[in-house]
Amino acid sequence: MAKPVRINLALQGGGAHGAFTWGVLDRLLEEPEIEIAAISGTSAGALNGAAVKAGMLSGGTEAAKDNLDWVWEQIGALKDEAFPEWIQAWLPQPEFISKSLEYSLPYSLGDAMTRMISPYAWGPLYQNPLERIVERLDFGKVCAHSEPEFFVCATQVRDGKIRVFKGAEITTQAILASACLPTMFQAVEMKDPLNGNIEPFWDGGYTGNPALFPFFEPHLPDDVVVVNINPLLRDKTPVSPPEIQNRINEISFNSALLRDLRAIEFVQRLLHSGALQEGSMKDVRVHMIGDDALMNSLSVATKSVPVPTVLAQLKAAGRRAAGTFLEHHLSDLGARQTADLRAMFG
């Protein structure tokens, strides 16, 4: 049997839309020809990555899949068996649920409150709803030095720069910081790995969604598989206030990823033209798994409100997208890049 090809996984954040990544990972973990060497995750991507690593070190790929199921059951009070595949075909389409939720009075009032009332106004009543889930992860395994290596991205509030946590630096607080939207949650205060001081942190999506540079280390493989949650392209111009706000959010959370991809494409051109000596810099091969058509049909509402039926459908969509990628590009892993970065930035 051929040796599995080693890959790095870059997992975007996007709130409850991270259930799509749950499905992608669920399918990739079933593939015997792939070995996950490293994971970089932000927000929901960090939570997914922590579940995968803890599971893999405790019981292999099946334990990793079970861990992911548990995390998303907790997030959406969802049981997989409640929505078997044949029932999902009869459920309302996720875009219908998303739009209905977006224009509902309770969601509109809640959204307006986050723009007018600071999360600090709650005083002693404040509680981060993710904490009860994250603190139950096995951090002895999440922080282990064994592969897959794991990196969590957050944004340092005072200087506005990215911080990447790894090894023993990854705590409950680090993952909560990575998912800390400042309009909804109080800044997470913890030790800054750069200066050792206690500093406030916000969502990592502002500066690295996720960070790709941890994969540039020589001992890690050249192939980076990016799981996209936030659509890169929208053909329709946003016109309503929710649509405009949603697109602002997407552009903000894609900008850091696009910056890293542009840098990779620039280095590729220099290496392939001979302007840089071969081996002087890492020649990264980028691949992408996503479903822009589905994500374009959803609104920001289902990012912040985890509707169980939508989570189940996003998982199924993620499995389909990963299956399609493997069907067409499994043989490309370890050999050639499948993302057309030159066209993306041309």
Image: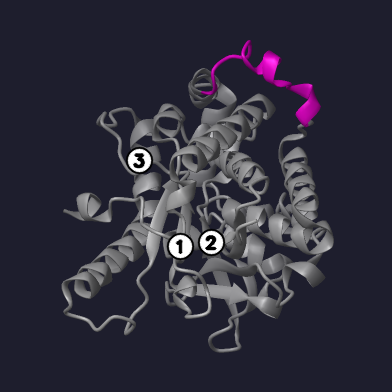
Q: Is residue 185 visible?
A: no
Residue at (51, 74) in percent of width and height: 163
The circle on residue 59 is none
Element at label 3: helix
Q: Is residue 92 shown left or right of residue 77?
A: left
Residue at the limit of the structure toward the front, as seen here = 1
Query: Number of callouts in the render?
Result: 3
Q: Percent from the top left, x then y, of residue 333?
A: 46, 55
Residue at (55, 48) in percent of width and height: 117
Q: Badge 1 is on which residue?
A: 223
Residue type (three-letter) at the residue carrying disc 2: Ile
Element at label 2: strand
Rate crowding at label 1 as few (under 14), some (14 to 19) or many (20 or more) other CA atoms within 10 Å: many
Name which of mark 3 and mark 2 comes first in the sequence: 2
Nearest to viewer (mark 3 / mark 2): 2
Name which of mark 3 and mark 1 comes first in the sequence: 1
The circle on residue 247 is 3
Q: Is residue 106 shown left or right of residue 52?
A: left
Rate crowding at label 3 as few (under 14), some (14 to 19) or many (20 or more) other CA atoms within 10 Å: many
Report the magenta residues as a range.
80-94
Residue type (three-letter) at the residue carrying disc 1: Asp
230 relative to 257, above or below:
above
Question: Quadrant where the N terminus lies?
Answer: bottom right
Q: Badge 2 is on which residue?
A: 7
Q: Are marks 3 and 1 in contact (CB under 8 Å)?
A: no
Residue at (60, 53) in percent of width and height: 33
